[in-house]
Image: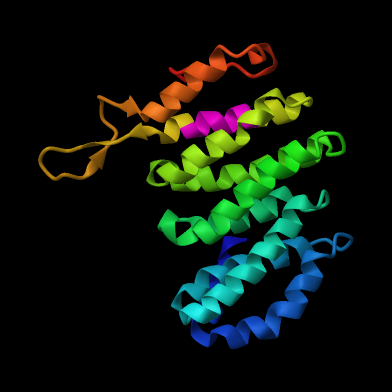
Amino acid sequence: SESSAHVFKGLSALLGMEFYKLVKDAMIEALRNFSEPGCQCVAAEIVAGVTRGSKWWPFDQQKQLWDEMVALLVEVLINSESEVAEWSMCIRFIVADRDPRRLRWLTDRMMQEVANGIASKKDVITAVLGTKQLKFAQQFLSEFTWRATALNLSAMYLLEPLLTHQYKQIRDRTAMIIKVVVRNSMLPTRKPTTGHPTFAKPLFLNPQVVSFLGRISHSPNWDKCCAIRPDT
């Protein structure tokens, strides 16, 4: 749960790298334990809390942690037995209310793993595993919304080949993510009085998104994709 992740976040911020070293072995053991109930939950809480709490660490220690956490999250991503709910919570906790530019070390790698992994292993990957991986990817876009323009556009182009994947579940989930990108690309206008962003009309889409939707809606494989229209 997020309350437990908050506890690990506080301990990570207070005790630094030493706390991570204390819990690292137990965390990895729980992460790889799929037989006992609750192990995946505990591992996700520790990963979420330690990663979020590390923003107060020296940069060299943060970099070391990032490398290790990315490797662990990729392991979770490609494992068919990983719990979607628990690890989705983990990702939400890590990225919530954070500057997307400070999390490129995580978002770029995860998006690449999802898109390239599903596309390159389309003959062996199952529909369930592919859909699960896309759900993980969707968490980033749903949390960052319009604040992560570069991530939204990158995800849109990376996931485009999956719109014609052989499995309907993967095509459907990819279409849902594209719809999130479209929603995120509704650029906010500015209030004339305060200058703060507002989504009061008029709204307009990022031109690259408009061009992308126009292209895929006229592709010969459009009948294999879920219907995505510019007015979605």
Q: Residue furthest left?
A: 193
Quadrant hosting residue 36? bottom right
Residue that appears at 49% across and 21% down: 213
88 or 134: which is nearer to us? 134
Residue that appears at 81% across and 72% down: 29
Span highlighted in magenta in the image: 174-181
Q: Is residue 16 left or right of residue 81?
A: left
Color encoding of the figure = rainbow
Q: Is residue 134 left or right of residue 97?
A: right
- What is the magenta segment's predominant secondary structure? helix
The relative height of residue 145 versus residue 175 in the rendered view (above or below) is below
Residue that appears at 86% across and 34% down: 123
The relative height of residue 172 versus residue 120 in the rendered view (above or below) is above
Counting from the top left corner in percent of width and height, residue 181 is at 49, 34
Quadrant hosting residue 199? top left
Counting from the top left corner in percent of width and height, residue 53 is at 51, 73
Q: Is residue 31 left or right of residue 110?
A: right
Magenta stretch holds residue 178: yes
Magenta stretch holds residue 52: no
The answer to whether residue 14 is visible is yes
45 or 159: which is nearer to us? 159
Counting from the top left corner in percent of width and height, residue 102 is at 44, 61
Quadrant for the N terminus in the image: bottom right
Residue that appears at 74% across and 27% down: 165
Counting from the top left corner in percent of width and height, residue 57 is at 48, 80
Q: Is residue 9 left or right of residue 148?
A: right
The answer to whether residue 228 is visible is no
